[in-house]
């Protein structure tokens, strides 16, 4: 299982394993019809899925002043979206950040566009809009102060987190 106490990068082996494990549990969940012991087994599966994703986050980095996904990141995000489109229990939370350079207004718009860009990839691969929340945090989420050039790259990212929703079995 994935070490879920850290931020994963797109394309990382742990992310692929997490997606595979979630897919297996979703397939098992789909076999239950909600009667008798199946209801209990479904709840156990849902709780195990929640445990798997509760502290996992994926960082999608961006270049300075840009909301365009680089080609290799787009390909990896598409792979993830393809897997998640088949796991309806997983909800997706997108949180877009910027570094401290630029005006608040510029950074807010930039963060909005970054969140929209990542959300668009999930939508284009069949993930239902109701499963996705997206918000622009902008500079308010920056961890590195003005002048810390080494830290700017860590603030220029969109974080993707997951939740597990109750689904009809």
Image (spheres, rainbow, N blue to C red):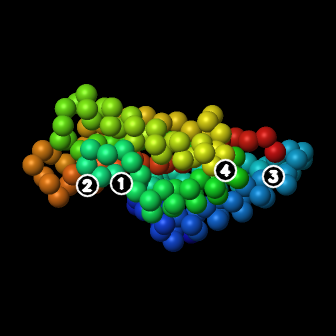
Seen from this angle, which residue lies furthest bottom? 13
Give the total of numbered labels. 4
Q: Nearer the viewer, residue 78 or 94?
A: 78
Per the image, label 1 sits on a secondary structure element best described as: strand
CA–CA distance between discs 3 and 2?
41 Å
CA–CA distance between discs 2 and 1?
8 Å
Asked whether, in this view, residue 75 is left or right of residue 169, the answer is left
Tell me the number on the disc at residue 149: none
Q: Would you say the residues marked 2 and 1 are in contact, meaning their CB atoms lie under 8 Å apart?
A: yes
Per the image, label 4 sits on a secondary structure element best described as: loop
Q: Earlier in the sequence, mark 3 or mark 2?
A: 3
CA–CA distance between discs 3 and 1?
34 Å
Query: Crowding near pointer 4: few (<14 within 10 Å), some, many (20+)?
Result: some
Q: Earlier in the sequence, mark 2 or mark 4?
A: 4
At a point 27% along the width and 35% down the height, the residue shown is: 107
Residue for badge 1: 61
At a point 64% along the width and 57% down the height, the residue shown is: 83
Q: Nearer the viewer, mark 3 or mark 4?
A: 4
Q: Nearer the viewer, residue 40 or 137?
A: 137
Residue for badge 2: 153
Image quarter hosting the C terminus: top right
Q: Earlier in the sequence, mark 3 or mark 4?
A: 3
Q: Earlier in the sequence, mark 4 or mark 1?
A: 1
Rendered position, 20 above or below 104: below
CA–CA distance between discs 2 and 4?
30 Å
Residue for badge 4: 85
Query: Crowding near pointer 2: few (<14 within 10 Å), some, many (20+)?
Result: some
Q: Nearer the viewer, mark 3 or mark 1?
A: 1
Residue for badge 3: 30
């Amino acid at each position: 299982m994935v070490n879920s106490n850290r931020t994963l990068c797109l394309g990382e082996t742990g992310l692929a394993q997490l997606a595979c494990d979630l897919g297996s549990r979703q397939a098992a969940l789909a076999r239950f019809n909600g009667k008798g012991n199946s209801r209990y087994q479904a709840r156990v599966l849902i709780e195990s899925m929640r445990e798997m994703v509760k502290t996992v986050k994926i960082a999608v980095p961006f270049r300075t002043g840009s909301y365009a996904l680089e080609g290799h990141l787009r390909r990896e995000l598409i792979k993830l979206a393809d897997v998640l489109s088949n796991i309806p229990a997983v909800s997706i939370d997108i949180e877009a950040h910027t570094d401290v350079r630029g005006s608040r207004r510029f950074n807010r718009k930039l963060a909005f566009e970054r969140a929209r860009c990542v959300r668009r990839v999930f939508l284009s691969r069949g993930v239902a809009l109701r499963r996705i929340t997206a918000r622009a945090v902008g500079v308010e989420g920056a961890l590195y102060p003005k002048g810390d050039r080494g830290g700017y790259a860590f603030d220029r990212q969109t974080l993707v987190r997951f939740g597990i929703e109750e689904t009809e079995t």
